[in-house]
Amino acid sequence: MKTWMAFPMAMAVALAGCATKPDADARARQAFAAGQQQAFTQITEARRTSILFIGPVRQREIPWSDGLTLAQAVAAAGYTDTRDPRNIFVDRQRVRIPFDPQALLQGKDLPLEPGDTIEIYP
C-alpha cells in the first residue's frame, strides 16, 4: 500500500519542475553575478560627479563645479534643437525633478548637484 501511494507523489514532484542541484547552483551563480553587476553600477553612478545629458545636445557630459545651475549646464552642453524645450527633468539620486522650460527662459534656475542627469526634450 505504501508503494502505491509513493509512486503518484514521486510523479507529482517530478512533474512540478524540481531542479537538479547543478541547475540550482547555476541559477544561484547567475543571480549572484547579476547582483554584483548591479551593485557595481550603483557604486559607479554614486561616485560620478559630472552632469550627464539625455536629449539633443552637442556634449553628453559636462564637468560639475560648485554653483553650477541648470541654465549654465544646458548652455555648456549646447542644446541643438531649433525648437524650445518642452520638457526638462533632472534625475538626482533616483528622484526625478520636473523643471518647466518656460521658467528657465524667464530667469528661474535650479542649482545642480554632482552626478545629476538632465533629460531635455523638444
Image (cartoon, rainbow, N blue to C red):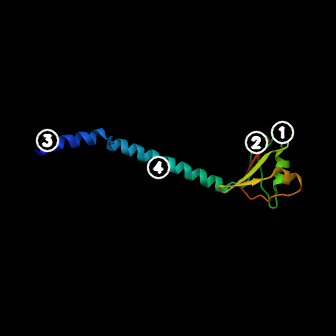
Residue drawn at point x = 18 percent, y = 40 percent: 7
Secondary structure, mark 2, is: loop
Residue at x 86%, y 58% (from the top left corner): 108
Marks 3 and 2 sit apart, C-alpha to C-alpha, by 68 Å
The residue type indicated by label 2 comes to: Gly
Residue corresponding to mark 4: 32
User: In the visual, does 71 lie left or right of 9?
Assistant: right
**Dot in front, 4 or 3:** 3
Which is more toward the observer, 37 or 71? 71
Mark 1 = which residue?
Answer: 81
Q: Residues within 10 Å of mark 2 (few under 14, many from 20)?
A: some
Q: What is the C-alpha distance between the residues marked 1 and 4?
A: 43 Å
Determine which residue is flagged by label 2.
Answer: 55
Q: Name, please, the residue furthest toward the bottom.
A: 66
Q: Which residue is mark 3?
A: 4
Q: Identify the mark nearer the N-term, 1 or 2.
A: 2
Side (left or right) of 25 relative to 109:
left
Spatial CA span between label 4 and label 3: 41 Å
Q: Are marks 1 and 2 in contact (CB under 8 Å)?
A: yes
Q: Residue at x 82, y 50 (%)?
A: 101
Q: Which of the two marks, 3 or 1, is nearer to us in this view?
A: 3
